[in-house]
Image (cartoon, grey):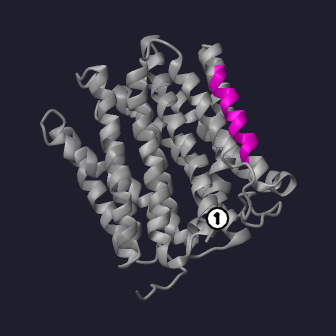
Amino acid sequence: MRWGTYFAVCAAVISIGLALGVTMPLVSLRLESWGYDAFSIGVMAATPAVGVLLGASLAGRLAARLGTTLLMQLCLLLGALSVAGLALLQNYAVWLALRLFIGVALTVVFILGESWINQLVVEKWRGRLVALYGSGYALSQLCGPLLLTALGTDTDSGFWTGVGLLIGGSLVLLGRTGAPTVDAHSGSGRGLLQFCRRLPAIAWAVMLFAAFEAMMLTLLPIYGLRQGFTQEVALFMVSVVVVGDAVLQLPIGWLADRMSRQRLFLCCGLVLLLSSLSIPVLLHTPLIWPLLVAFGATAGGLFTLSLIMIGERYRDDELVRANAHVAQLWGLGCLVGPLLTGAVSQWLSGHALPMMMAFGALVFVWLAWRGNGLMPLAEQSR
């Protein structure tokens, strides 16, 4: 196994998490200070999802033409240029366009990077090594809001920090080889409905975690503010959720190498359902902090386990194609989650965020409980 390449690719993708962790809450808080309502902020949060859908259709064709490593580097640099635009051109309509472009560029990196990681790891360590990547990505998002708190939200330092991180992510890929073989069809995203029919629980888990991640970085700070917390506490709530996501992914990956992954998948969904329902009840009590840890851990566990189970099923072209479908589902989750939650929050309930997550978790539990949501791979003996 090429350990140097594994850690380099992980670092490149993780640089995106840290950059987004700094810039996404800053965008929402800046819009809040400008007087925009919850739905307008939700629209801004959902805009990169459209770019995700576009990026998923372009990744294979561009990688076949330019090569995986070069394309990932170029997309990271284009993402850095777009984030710089957020600092230089502070206008709602311009920001919508820039965030759309960020979605396109960084989605290509995710598709190719996660395919590369899953191809590199050996089967007996798949759960732990994919979870290590997931933990690193979650920790980067944890550090993002904390770094933003240190930098302050009154200046554009957060945007410029994001620019530097994305440039650094491009540099660590210099000279790396061994990516999955990609042809023009592999990352085109065709066959999404067939993928969803074959693996409905995995497909829904990806969409649910995408909605979760978009809402945690953009709408959770606003949720906290509107429930009476200070800006510092609201940002800290985001960090606590991501702590749960980051710290507990390695134990989940360890368990995934030692027990039924389908059973573990279902358990994560059940805990996510219960924790989502409990947030409004325990929001103003000390119990909210361990609850937010469990909330983040189980949501992250759904995505980590999805990647593990995709990696054990597919290789090379099929693996890249499967990750293109993951990106499409991610884009749909990022698009629908913030838009729907922003609308429900404004017009129906101030607790829309945890209630929408509870509904999504309930659908997942139903799919996983049916027992065919993870086909076609038979349960492996361990």
Q: Main secondary structure of the magenta part?
A: helix
Give the residues drawn in magenta, as a range.
72-85
Q: Residue at x 57, y 49 (%)?
A: 11
Above or below for 64 versus 137: below
| 111 to the left or right of 152 | right
Left or right of 225 on screen, residue 168: right
Rendered location of residue 2, percent (x, y): 63, 67
Left or right of 347 in this view: 379? right
351 vs 16, nearest the viewer: 16
Counting from the top left corner in percent of width and height, residue 302 is at: 41, 60
> Residue 267 versus residue 136: which sits nearer the camera?
136
Residue at the bottom extreme, as displayed: 381
Is residue 191 among the parts visible in the rendering? yes
Q: Is residue 349 visible?
A: no
**Mark 1 residue crowding within 10 angstroms, few (<14) / some (14–19) / many (20+):** many
Q: Is residue 15 above or below residue 382?
A: above
Q: Is residue 76 magenta?
A: yes
Task: Give the labeled residue for mark 1.
Answer: 322
Image quadrant holding the C terminus, namely: bottom left
Tell me residue 103's x, y (percent): 64, 38
* Residue 44 screen position, x and y as percent: 54, 28
